[in-house]
Image: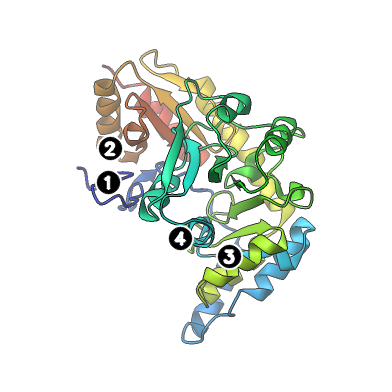
Amino acid sequence: MSKYMGKIMNKNNTYQGGAENFKGVIRLSSNENNNGIPAKVKKIISQNAKFSHIYPELNSQSLIKKIADYNKIKEQNIIIGAGSDEVLQMIFNAFTKPGDYVMYSKYSFAMYRVFANNFKCKSLVFNDKNFKFKLEDFKKKYNSKVKLIFLANPNNPTGSIFLKKELVNFIKSINEKTILVLDSAYSEYLLNADYTDGIHLVNKFKNIIVTKTFSKIFGLGGLRVGWGYAQNQLIQKLYQVKKPFNVSRIASAAAYNILNKNWVKKQALLNISNKSYILSRLNNYNIEIIDTDANFVLLKLGSEKKSKMLNNFAIKNKITVRSLKSYGLPNFIRMSVGTKKEIKRVVEVLNNFNV
């Protein structure tokens, strides 16, 4: 394996990310925001490094208040995790026991499968035949024994979305004892009025947990901050399994100060602009480009062999992308939307790729 690349899963069923080596490399393998964070937040990070010997707040109370104000939601219904991955882990820990059924799409975030296996749950995997499946088809696989359902919206790695009406109808159709986890990691990239990240559905439905992260549009993937939102009875159970002091002082301070709606909208619009550039300029007929509703595109090759060749070609040109072989999509590659300078280089490289 190249020093630039990582695998999603290994034989021990643990998650491994994209490229670890990023010096001098255009890193487009992990859907990070390569545009960088505001200077103000960089300064806050530096200032808080001076207090690294001091424990952070027990439950990140200051950040919780800021998130509540930013989203106009209730403080008492928020829990903070070291990335939304930790919130997902809390959900499994709090609500499942060995042998319980959990449900998710075959082409969805790898950690659902990792946690299901680690907590010895039985998985009902929906084998979606296309990237934009309907929840009414997903529902046909469901039964009332399912303890947890995981829906990423937008989905990773396919980038497809469910609109509000479809989502509400689905929630109404499932057993109230089944908990629906809405993974909204990429939600800030959506400017569609018919889309919902699920936060404001929590007041209406008692069996929803929404998870969100600061790792994507907010650009704080290296600091590990995420959060969950649900009605009180679910949140209290999550607090029972939460570790104390789980998010560092530096991470909490950075997340607190990066919550700015104007800056976030600017990042979303920049993503749309840069993605349009990729779609319009990549003229290589050996590659089919598939747009998504998130901050990445999919590259479809004619075979697994061609996909591997493109992956290696990118590596030789110091560009890292993500093979989707471990997701069951061996002839697909996922590529994050980088900065304008980065994507100009990517377009130049990929247009020179010949099979």
Q: Position of residue 15 (x, y in %)?
A: 35, 51
Q: Tag 4, which secondary structure? A: loop
Residue in the image at 59% along x and 32% along y = 293
The label nearer to you, 2 versus 4, is: 4
200 horizontally vs 15: left or right: right
Cα separation, mark 3 vs mark 2, equals 41 Å
Q: Tag 3, which secondary structure? A: helix
Colouring mode (rainbow / by chain / secondary structure / one colour): rainbow
Which badge, 3 or 2, is on the more N-terminal residue?
3
Cα separation, mark 2 vs mark 4, equals 22 Å
Residue in the image at 34% along x and 46% along y = 25
- Give the quarter of the image for residue 266: top right
- Which residue in the protein does label 2 denote? 315
Where, quadrant-wise, is the N terminus in this rendering? top left
- Label 2 sits on what residue type? Ile
Cα separation, mark 1 vs mark 4, equals 17 Å
Mark 2 and mark 1 in contact? Answer it, CB < 8 Å: yes
- Label 1 sits on what residue type? Tyr
Cα separation, mark 3 vs mark 1, equals 36 Å
Q: Tag 2, which secondary structure? A: helix
Label drawn at residue 238: 3
Label drawn at residue 4: 1
Q: Residues within 10 Å of mark 1 (few under 14, many from 20)?
A: many
Label drawn at residue 319: none
Which badge, 3 or 1, is on the more N-terminal residue?
1
Q: Position of residue 158 (x, y in %)?
A: 49, 31
- Label 4 sits on what residue type? Gly
Where, quadrant-wise, is the C terminus in this rendering? top left
